[in-house]
Image: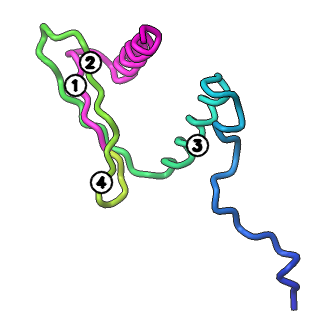
């Protein structure tokens, strides 16, 4: 019979670096936060609904991820005609970064 005292218990926390391990707002802290979120949402079903905007609209809009009753994640994105999701995400990220710098 094995001695249970020699067995390691399961950790209730997410393994890996945590944002608090680094200075607040540092590149490492932000990378650790992104990594934690990626691990948290890995394996979940994700759905993105893309709506084409009218020809005269040039600004993309990407909605927040929302959790469904089944645990899946979904969001609605409005993109100008012909714009790829990758391009829209880049534009929205640049806009958010510029807004943070301005504050």
Q: CA distance from mark 3 to mark 2?
A: 27 Å
Residue at the spot of label 4: 68
* Quarter occupied by residue 55: top left
Tell me if mark 1 has few (under 14), some (14-19) or many (20+) residues whose alpha carbon lies within 10 angstroms of its own.
Answer: many
Residue 75 in magenta?
yes
The answer to whether the residue labelled 4 contacts the one labelled 1, judged by CB atoms less than 8 Å apart, is no
Q: Which circle's residue, 4 or 1, is located before the other in the chain? A: 4
Q: Which circle's residue, 3 or 1, is located before the other in the chain? A: 3
Tag on residue 28? none
Please identify, in this view, whether the residue under mark 4 or under mark 1 is nearer the observer: 4
Tag on residue 78? 1
Say whether residue 43 is left or right of residue 1. left
Q: Which circle's residue, 4 or 3, is located before the other in the chain? A: 3
Residue at the spot of label 2: 60
| First to last magenta residue range | 74-103
Q: Which circle's residue, 1 or 2, is located before the other in the chain? A: 2
Please identify, in this view, whether the residue under mark 3 or under mark 1 is nearer the observer: 3
On screen, 18 above or below 50? below
Tag on residue 36? 3
Residue 93 in magenta?
yes
x%, y% of residue 69? 29, 59
Q: Which circle's residue, 4 or 2, is located before the other in the chain? A: 2
Q: Which circle's residue, 3 or 2, is located before the other in the chain? A: 3
């Amino acid at each position: 019979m094995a001695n249970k005292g020699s067995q390691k218990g399961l950790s209730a926390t997410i393994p890996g670096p945590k944002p608090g391990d680094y200075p607040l707002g540092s590149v490492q802290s932000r990378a650790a936060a992104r990594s934690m979120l990626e691990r948290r949402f890995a394996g979940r079903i994700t759905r993105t609904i893309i709506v084409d905007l009218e020809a005269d609209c040039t600004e993309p809009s990407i909605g927040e991820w929302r959790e469904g009753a089944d645990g899946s994640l979904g969001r609605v994105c409005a993109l100008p005609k012909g714009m790829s999701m990758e391009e829209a995400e880049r534009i929205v990220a640049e806009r958010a970064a510029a807004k943070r710098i301005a504050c």
